Image (spheres, rainbow, N blue to C red):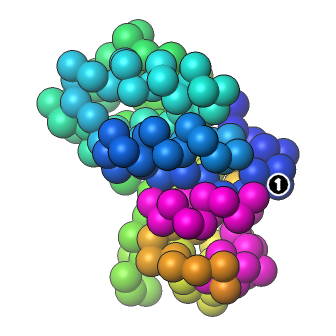
Amino acid sequence: MVDSEILVESPVIAAIKDERGLGECLKTECQVVFILFGNVCNIGDIVKRVKDGGKRAIVHMDLVNGLSSKEISVDFIKNTTQADGIISTKPMIVKRAKELGLLTIQRFFIIDSIALENSKRQIEIYHPDCVEIMPGIMPKILKDIRAFVNVPVIAGGLLTDKKDVMGALSAGADAISTTNENLWKLQ
């Protein structure tokens, strides 16, 4: 399970978008891996490689080719992989994953005040284990979300250097997720 303790120990989450990234993240000290690619035929193997590397595997349900946006897709991930949890922008996917005992991360794209208010409503209704706020370079919004929730907050998207990482963590994020391999080494 990904909890606030692991995020304190390893606040940089490797977000992988291809096979090359998978190979590179296995060489790092990142303890949590967000899997942002794959399809129904290979997602089990990708998760297995992450788990065999001693890392926690979180599958982004919205980005696995061949999965529908229906809740039954979560059952597929639970029953055919060893994934520790899921990420999704879809509240019903998060709800089903919670019912199945998977770690749930709900991803929100905060593009305006309406999106911010909608995210707060969804958090109140669906109670994800963690929330991921994108883009992750918005300290004011991260502070607002941090004050609103009692679950780990992950900042993701558009983080390009150590200053961005430190800014997100200083604003209240518990961890950051990034596809930028240079930032994976900041542990």
Secondary structure state at the residue bearing disc 1:
helix
Image quadrant in which you'd find residue 26 = top right
Vertical comparison of 71 with 41: above or below:
below
Please name the residue shown 66% across and 79% down the image.
Answer: 162
- Whether residue 140 sits left or right of residue 64 in the image: it is right
Front-most of residues 175 and 91: 175
Point out residue 160 in the picture as x, y percentages from the top left corner: 51, 79
- Magenta region, residue range: 164-187
Vertical comparison of 23 with 170: above or below:
above
Please name the residue shown 44% across and 40% down the image.
Answer: 22
Image quadrant in which you'd find residue 80 = top left
Please name the residue shown 75% across and 51% down the image.
Answer: 10
Point out residue 158 in the picture as x, y percentages from the top left corner: 45, 77
Q: Is residue 135 visible?
A: no
Please name the residue shown 68% across and 41% down the image.
Answer: 31
Q: Is residue 48 visible?
A: yes
- Whether residue 104 sits left or right of residue 153 in the image: it is left
Vertical comparison of 37 with 71: above or below:
below
- Whether residue 22 sits left or right of residue 52 in the image: it is left
The quadrant in which the N terminus is found is: top right
Amino acid type indicated by mark 1: Val
Front-most of residues 154 and 27: 27
How crowded pointer 1 is (Cα within 10 Å; few <14, some 14-19, many 20+) is rated as few
What is the count of numbered marks? 1
Magenta stretch holds residue 179: yes
Image quadrant in which you'd find residue 142 = bottom right
Which residue position is annotated with label 1? 8
Magenta stretch holds residue 143: no
Point out residue 79 in the picture as x, y percentages from the top left corner: 41, 10
Point out residue 128 in the picture as x, y percentages from the top left corner: 57, 46
The quadrant in which the C terminus is found is: bottom right
